Amino acid sequence: MDGDVEQKSSVGVIGAGIQGVCVSLNLIKKGFKVTIIDKDEPGKNSASYGNAGHFSPYASLSMNRPDILIDVPAMLLSATGPLALKWNYVPKMIPWFLKFIKNCTKKKMMHTAKYMHQILDLALPAYDELFQEIDISGLVESKGIIYFWTDKDLKSRELEINVRKELGVEQKLLKPHEIHDLEPHIKQIYHGGVLYPGARHARNPRKILIKLFDLFLKKGGKFKKENVEKINFSSDDKPLIKTSSNLYTFDKAVIACGAFSKKLTDQTNEKIPLDTERGYHVHFKGYDNLLSRPVIFLNRGFGITPMEQGLRVVGTVEFGGLHNPVSKKRILNLVNNAKYLFPELNDHDDEWLGFRPTLPDFLPVMGKSKNHKNLFYSFGHHHLGWTLGAISGKIVAGIIAKENTNLDLSAYSSSRFN
């Protein structure tokens, strides 16, 4: 009988991005009563709208690697480089950077890669399950993703290829003529590349998110467009969520609001070192015929995805928190990089800035809060929030429903920081 009561309990999910919507959909399927709360409509200008649209099951190797520390100063000084700092944010970033540096050993890198690979391996099947229930025709393409490079920094390329090989990731090394055969419109500046054939891409991430959200509503889910200000707990540890206009009581709650999650986890007295990588995009409208799949130019750390809106040029990692203004320099950097590969591009549109929630070990936080048995987390997926939406939703809903799993979930626990 107890299990029956458990199934009927109410869950408040804070965040209407891909994480929150996927957690909520999976909970609804298990019989929970679910309410999503977010200050914005789903996908409005958020990371779930503005991302690169990649489904990247190969991307187990993150930024915490021994070779990156040697490259950081050069990256910061290069006008075309992938990394930038807002100097007014440096004092705030120092504790995060120190933790990040500790995670840049070979051992820690392999730990991250192993536990990213565990969930990335299941990422696309988890989406396929959800996609059976919505019409995604014309919205997802399965043509793989190409990375290419010049003959600079080849040690880093070797490292990536070898680690992925060790993990059993499907990859096909490309010679320059093979890159040209696949994508003939790119200026031939490259010396080598790799195709990840199992990868896919979204033609419009926001449209997919909205379809999943509409399915959630159709199955009886509720949505409150309100700004969550505080999370407290009743005497029996039930979450009390205070918004700008209401107070809600739930049996359980999930924090899944990406880079904004730290504001709430700090209130639960849990020190999770979440910070923000700021990412940008621009569109070149009407040029999506120049590319048939996403490409990433590794030397300059940016990518281009053919989408309904044209070519979406994405990239750069800027450390500057949630409150600094848009950096025109980073936008210009993206525009110039795109024109370097495609000299025929004209004016760009839609300058967008979004926030990637990133932890110093480049693993997400998924699972139960350290201090409250009815509070759960699903955030911190850095560059892979879009790829990992469906599988995170499945895992976190399974934890809430107290289901057994054969996955080792300890690496994603928030208690690793305490």
Image (cartoon, helix red, strand yellow):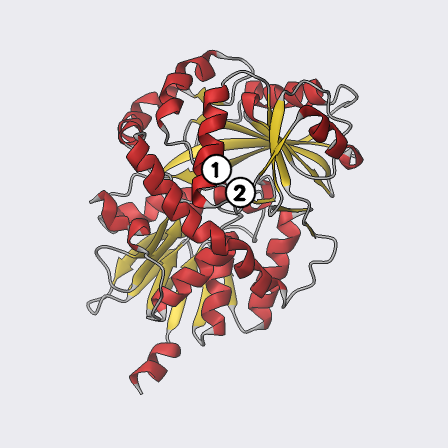
Q: In this view, does 248 lie above or below 370?
A: below
Q: What kind of element bears circle 2? A: helix
Considering depth in this image, is 134 or 261 the residue closer to the camera?
Answer: 134
Q: Mark 2 points at which residue?
A: 47
Q: Name the residue under label 1.
A: 355
Q: In this view, does 362 lie to the left or right of 225?
A: left
Query: At 70% across and 22% down in the image, what residue appears?
Result: 341
Considering depth in this image, is 152 or 202 the residue closer to the camera?
Answer: 152
**Total numbered circles:** 2
Q: Is residue 77 above or below residue 230?
A: above
Residue 92 in sight: yes
Sort mark 1 into few (<14), some (14-19) or many (20+) by Cα contacts within 10 Å: many
- Residue 303, picture quadrant: top right
Tell me residue 154's x, y (percent): 50, 20
Q: What kind of element bears circle 1? A: strand
Q: What residue type is labelled 1?
A: Phe
Sort mark 2 into few (<14), some (14-19) or many (20+) by Cα contacts within 10 Å: many
Q: Which of marks 2 and 1 is nearer the N terminus?
A: 2
Query: At 45% across and 62% down in the image, what residue appears?
Result: 394
The residues bearing labels 2 and 1 have C-alpha atoms spaced at a distance of 6 Å
Query: Disc 2 vs disc 1: Cβ atoms closer than 8 Å?
Result: yes
Tell me residue 380's x, y (percent): 40, 44
Residue 147 in sight: no
Q: Is residue 49 above or below residue 15?
A: above
Query: At 23% across and 66% down in the image, what residue appears?
Result: 237
